[in-house]
Image (cartoon, grey):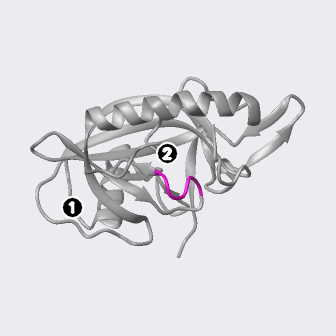
Amino acid sequence: MERYKIPLVNGFGRTIGYGDRWWTHRVRDGSDGPILGEKHVGITIACLDDDGRILVQLRRHRIFDKVWSLSGDTHPRKYESSKAESLSEAARRCAKEDLGVVIKSWRKILTVSYSARDPRDPRYCENELLSVLAAKHKGPMNMNRNSAYELGWAKFAEISRDSQTDSKKRSRLTASTHPGSVPCSRSHMKGLKKPS
């Protein structure tokens, strides 16, 4: 399989090149403390049902493993032989690979810049300009067991409450254990309880 790179961005969100997907997530030593990878483009997809619930996953991944996340996480891919995927193309691929569904129409609902160090493996981090793309979906899904341990539906209020509680906890921990980390409550919602 051909290796791909992911878009690197500057402080204004402009693409400045492409980097190895693992290198961009590595914490490196800097003269003023840890450097949290390279700023890159990230995408989280949020599948919504008719009752306003959001599909969440217990993430299976080298980075931020075993944390509750939105429906899927990815990056636009750039192969040598082609141009980089658009956000919508990457969202469609993610839904097909991770959930076994074809969803053609995605709407960007939020873009946020954040960085966080993986508490389970401090060699890795996120440093993303993250776009959240949402779409409605009815019907069955086929979870990719290489991407998630389990799926569930959660109400927005439940996600918001649990991620705010976790963000406060993480803020206290981060300040004392990982200087240079910025606490955030991205889609990697460590504190989210199993959805009911």
Q: Is residue 84 visible?
A: no
Residue 101 shows in the view:
yes
Label 1 amino acid?
A: Val
Q: Nearer the viewer, mark 1 or mark 2?
A: 2
- Going by the numbered disc 2, the residue's amino acid type is Lys
> Does residue 178 show up magenta in the picture?
no
Residue 11 position within the rendered picture, expressed as x and y whole percent measured from the top left: 60, 25
Q: Which residues are magenta?
A: 63-67
Residue 109 falls left or right of residue 8: left
Q: Residue at x 52, y 31 (%)?
A: 167
Q: Quadrant of residue 87?
A: top left
Q: Which residue is mark 1?
A: 102
Q: From what the image shows, is residue 113 above or below residue 48? A: above
Q: Say which residue label 2 marks.
A: 190
Instruction: Give SS at disc 2.
Output: loop
Quadrant for residue 146, please give it: bottom left
Disc 1 and disc 2 in contact, CB within 8 angstroms? no
Image coords of residue 106 (percent x, y):
24, 44
Which element type, helix, strand or loop, lies under badge 1?
A: loop
The dot on residue 181 is none
The answer to whether residue 109 is above or below residue 135 is above
Q: Nearer the viewer, residue 18 or 57?
A: 57
Q: Is residue 7 above or below residue 163?
A: below
Image quarter of residue 51: top left
Q: Main secondary structure of the magenta part?
A: loop
User: In screen coordinates, is 176 left or right of 147?
Assistant: right
Q: Position of residue 118 (x, y in %)?
A: 63, 47
Q: Is residue 25 left or right of residue 49?
A: right
What is the residue that sits farthest to the right in this orientation?
31
Count neighbours of disc 1 (C-alpha within 10 A) and say few if under 14, some if 14 to 19, many if 20 or more.
Answer: some
Residue at 47% from the left image edge and 37% from the top image edge: 186
